Image (tube, coloured by chain):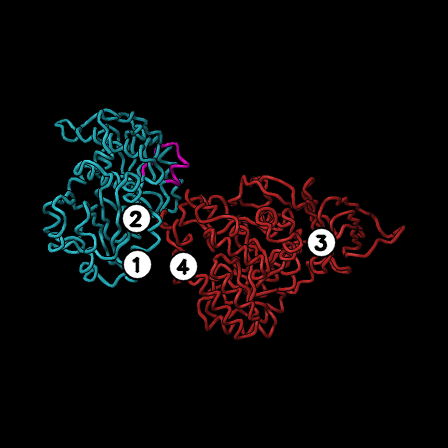
Chain colours: A cyan, B red
Amino acid sequence: MTTHQWKHKDLCALADHTSDELITILDTAKAFKGVGERNLKKVPALRGKTLVNFFIEPSTRTRISFELAAMRLSADVVNISASASSLEKGETLLDTARNLEALRADLIVIRHKSAGSARFLADRLNASVINAGDGAHEHPTQGLLDAFTIREKLGSIKGVRVAIVGDILFSRVARSNIQLLTKLGAEVTLVGPSTLVPTTFACLGVKLVHSIDEVLEEVDVINLLRIQHERQRKEYFPGLGEYTARFGLTKKRADRIKPQCLIMHPGPMNRGVEIDSDVADGRGSVILDQVTNGLAVRMAVLYLCSGGAPYAPATPVT
Amino acid sequence: MNTSLHIKGGRIIDPENGIDRIGDLFVRDGIIVDSLPKNDKDAQVIEVIDATGKVVSPGLIDIHVHFREPGQSHKETIATGARCAAAGGFTTVVCMPNTSPVADSPATIAWIQERAASTACVNVFCTGAITRGLAGEEMAPIGALAAAGVVALTDDGRCVQNHGVMRRAVEYARQYGLPVMDHCQESTLSADGVMNEGEWSTRLGLPGWPALAEDLIVARNILLAEETGHPIHCQHISSAHSVRLLREARLRGVPITAEACPHHIALTDGELKNFDTNFKMNPPLRTQADIDEIIAGISDGTITILASDHAPHATYEKEVEFDRAPFGILGLETELALFLEILLHQRKTLTLPQILAMLTVNPAKFLRLDRGTLSTGVPADITILDPDHAWIVDKNESASLSRNTPFHGHSLRGRALTTIVGGRVVWDLESGFRS
């Protein structure tokens, strides 16, 4: 039985929270999802609150999703980017954040290339700090929206078999997914080149495999991560062609998956690399549902971290 | 000034001379003497220190400290670093050359020596760089550095990556009898790593600095020491595998030595879970298996020297994103207590005289310092300590200009009570520093 509660001002990492707390967010998000489906897409929950979107690393979808989530909760929103901030002039992250707080920001949503940066600010500010991605550490709202989507489509997370495919080593999306899904009872398999799925990940209670063909027939969810072959990855694998040959979800491979298997991608996609274009648009793809659900999840997170009362459904699901 | 000291009734432990007995120790004119003359008319003052129930040790020696002068005196000065040493029971320290400018010229060495002579309350010795500017490319003026009085060569903080350069430097240093000390880190493997590569770097998403990067350079140094016949000292060993490599080499008689730091046997990489930069140092905290092997190495004679790697950084420099924070923590004031707490009280793998040997005679012999003993006729550097003294570390009581210790709030057993340099009490626990 889930005890619905949330007593934190921040959301920095899913690793920090109990399964009850994570379910509290998911259930609250479910209630908020209805708001987005209405003609009048706005509730007064955060009226008078100020949210600063503090994105020190480029992002479009996550920033807009947070911005819309805040607007739907009636908060005032300001966006700042690294180039527009004083960080460029050598101001420290902490000083910049303290300035935002001095302007009476109630919530600071931060994306930053350094792992731990959200936690660093959360420990030093009175404002709520929401992590929108810190280096390769976590991207908690992405993990939540992925879990929300699985739960919505498959009814439950417990016992669901999830494959996460791609550049796991450098992926904050993977880490947040692993934390949440294993806590809620899913069986998680990490799939990717042995350099990008190193053995150290076994300590997280997941299976590691190095060929997508090994998992195709047995999984209920395939979450494909964006794969890139820029300069810093060249010593990890030789090229995208070789990657696609072994790990790409091609049309042929998609024919082998279970009929009800969900195909997920956090975006932005490289069509023809980690995912075939037809597969991305085809049966089982819930990629755009993820985006829609992201809004509901972010509304729930902003609401709960501002002290809002959790939503507890009459019939609990896990 | 002809001050005499009479240290009464302490347990005198002098590892150099195999002494462990209750008795009195005498000092006259800054020198250890067998006894004080009766009716000493020349003596203006005879200070009597009651050491009953306490341990009287040769003054402790730390061969690995960063005092930040010249160039970074906002972090520490030679004066404040020396006060940390004194408050930690250390009478002699050896400074690393990564100052600004780098200590790679006789002029800089002379400046440091002059500064130490005029401001430091303990003995301060210098190391010189192996390569110019610690750049790992051209040999520093090793002969001139030797003439200026450096006690060893090291590019600490940076490891000489080019094996050809390192080989020639070791060969060249041999003609001056200057030991070479190396910070063992292969930089293509450590890359942009900021913590141990393993379970916790996986959890935290921080770039890993694998033990392998240390092991590879330890192996290189073993081979170079064997090839050249010249001593190489591996600084701050953090990895279990490095200990095993060193053990095997020392059994074969290779002239290789190694040191261990308190934090590498006190803390694991799991401490980084909150991204606290006071747990960030180089080499990084590793695993319990590494701790166990380092302690085994200290206990079986593989590692013969204990040191702190005292590395002060200003609070504002540490109060940044984890990967941007500088490496390093304070060490001198907690060093003795941590070694005693872990090795003597908890693990019980070594006796007090064995631990004190690694803080006195061993480093003194390695760097050929006329210190680390209570023999008659040597300068009276003496530390009076209580191995059972229980205390709680408070960073705000530190003599350092910085506050970057991960041990704030730790309860430890063992502490220096009185620090005597050249026959003069420079610090004691009750009254603090003597001007």
Q: Indicate the quadrant where residue A194 lies.
A: bottom left
The residue that label 1 is drawn on is: A195
Residues at marks 4 and 2, CA–CA distance in whole angstroms: 26 Å
User: Which residue is situated farthest in the right direction here?
Assistant: B39
Say yes or no: labels 3 and 4 on the same chain. Answer: yes
Neighbour tally class for label 3: few under 14, some 14-19, many 20 plus, Cα within 10 Å? many
Say whether disc 3 or disc 4 marks the residue closer to the N-terminus.
Answer: 3
Image mark 1: chain: A
The residue that label 3 is drawn on is: B13
Depth check, mark 3 against mark 4: the one in front is 3
Depth check, mark 4 against mark 1: the one in front is 1
- Tag of residue A114: none
The picture places residue A206, in percent across and down from the top left corner, at 30, 48
The picture places residue A74, in percent across and down from the top left corner, at 23, 27
Image mark 2: chain: A
Q: Residue at x 21, y 31 (%)?
A: A30
Residue A123 is covered by the magenta coloring: yes
The picture places residue B383, in percent across and down from the top left corner, at 69, 50
Q: Which residue is at the front of the view, B430 or B306? A: B306
The residue that label 2 is drawn on is: A206
Residues at marks 2 and 1, CA–CA distance in whole angstroms: 16 Å
Residue A201 is covered by the magenta coloring: no
Residues at marks 3 and 2, CA–CA distance in whole angstroms: 54 Å
